[in-house]
Image (cartoon, rainbow, N blue to C red):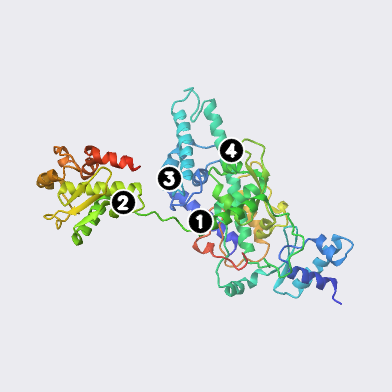
Amino acid sequence: MPEPIDVVEALLFASDTPVEAERIAEVLDLESAAVAREIVEGLRSRLDGESRALQVMEVGGGFRLVTRPDVAPWLVKLARSRTRSRLSRPALETLAIIGYRQPVSRPEVDAVRGVNSEAVLDNLLERRMIRIAGRKESPGRPFLYETTREFLVAFGLRDLGDLPKVEGELIVPELAEAAAAQLADPGPDQEEVTAAPDSSEQDPGPGGDRVSPSS
Amino acid sequence: MSGQETTAQGTSAQSQAADTGITVRVESFVGPLDLLLHLCRTNEMDLSRLSLRTITDQYLAHLEAVRFQDLETAGSFMVMAATLIYLKSKLLLPANPDEPEEALDEEGELLKRELEERLREYARVKALGAWLSERESEQSLVYGRTTAELPPPEDIPLEDLSVHLLQRAMQRLIEDQKRRTPRQVEPNPLSVLERMGEITDLLRSTWSLLFSSVAGAERLRAEWVVTLLALLELVRLGQARARQAELFGEIVIERHSVSVREPIREVDFAEEAPETEAPRDATAEEESPRPAPDETASPQAAMDAPPETTPTDDEARTEEGEPRNA
């Protein structure tokens, strides 16, 4: 008879989407989501303690079993593809606007970016980072966009509350520093060089369009 | 290499640019606000106290270096340029000369403040985009399942579905369908010159032809018109003769013994015309004799002209339901 912790491990292993604590409780006939959460935490410390190649990650309102960053180089080798496809800078900026202002219409996004965002929005829809939430009751009844669970998973966010807080008059360099500081502690970084907040030169280049094994 | 180090590199590169007073890299700016923000940073300018003079001049100078993705993006850069020039023009004509430098009238001040606000807003968005980019690259090192081998649930969760996805799927289907249906291939448009060549080719092996056999039995209007024009032109050039025994009757095309062998492809109408004077008389029943006003005219004019002077034939075709002006 397997222990609940083993069953939870199996659930996370087999599922393609983050498994919510509520769902775990339902499957295991537990009395509450809090108990399920405890079991997950037990699994987390077990995996960490045995320094296994897998870890439990809380994203998009649920739990996932994923590999640790330090085994990434071998997975890349296995996939025979150097990079996963990355979002372009316009796409990331558009996603940021939607993330904070959702639901938001295209004219509003355009106004903030100062350029037409139609193609970018189409791309994000295609990648399922955003979805249409309805229509705005304003002239032209434009579509309203909101972020999806895939968005949270792709960026490793538990929920929208994980997005950095932005104050009204915040000036950029400070935020960039804060973001960098926040990023410094979680997880070791590989040799992945990413867009520095100011340099803006690391748009996904030619290699960025490669299809990743997981996309 | 950590994200922090990259950030440091980015800023140091930028301060270098500011030191030397020139922008080293030709960056691809994603929009006018992006460019404006870049200029403010290189000038170490406070986003709530824009110096319009500096920024306008630099913006315009940079505009030439910007690679536009499309016309619409280019347009938005131009709109910003116009706004900046407008504001600068207001500076050059101060409403109140006693006021300090860079004083604007009420409208200009409002416009400037709006611009500053948009710039700050965009700066935040840009920083957030960079933050997301960091997260993305961090997540790119972590691999989890994206497809499960579990059998799909009996009731499909509809939470992540929207009408838009349905529309998209439908559109794709329609486009696929379109791609699969064979394309209608249009036959080459008929050419009088080609038809003339065909007739002379046929006349090489036979003495006479029936008009209907050349024009085709389908009686396509365009075919008949083109064939008739070709025939008339050959007659005019003396390369064929045509005979119509009775009104509306069959036209018989005959080889003109002398000039069949002459090449017709590169006919110079102006030169050929005098020689054709004589044969033309012989075929007067087809084509009434006329002066040669169009002998120097273009080939096209020459081809268009004959039907106008052949009333008999006109009638015939009209009766056959083949109006001349087709």
**C-alpha gap between disc 2 and disc 4:** 65 Å
**Residue B290 can be seen, yes or no:** yes
Residue at mark 2: chain: B
In the foreground, A129 or A5 = A129
- Whether residues under marks 2 and 3 lie with C-beta atoms below 8 angstroms apart, the answer is no
Mark pair 4, 1: CA separation: 25 Å
Q: Which amino acid does the dot numbered 3 rest on?
A: His
Q: Which residue is mark 1?
A: A201
Instruction: Kindly indicate whether the residues beneath marks 2 and 4 are on one polypeptide chain.
Output: yes
- Secondary element under disc 2, as helix, strand or loop, is loop
- Which mark, by number, is residue B190? 2
User: Label 3, label 4: how many angstroms apart (C-alpha)?
Assistant: 22 Å
Asked if both marks, 3 and 4, belong to the same chain, the answer given is: yes
Circle 4 residue: B117
Give the labeled residue for mark 3: B62
**Picture coordinates of residue A125 (x, y %)?**
61, 53
Query: Circle 2: is it few (<14), some (14-19), or many (20+) Cα within 10 Å?
Result: few
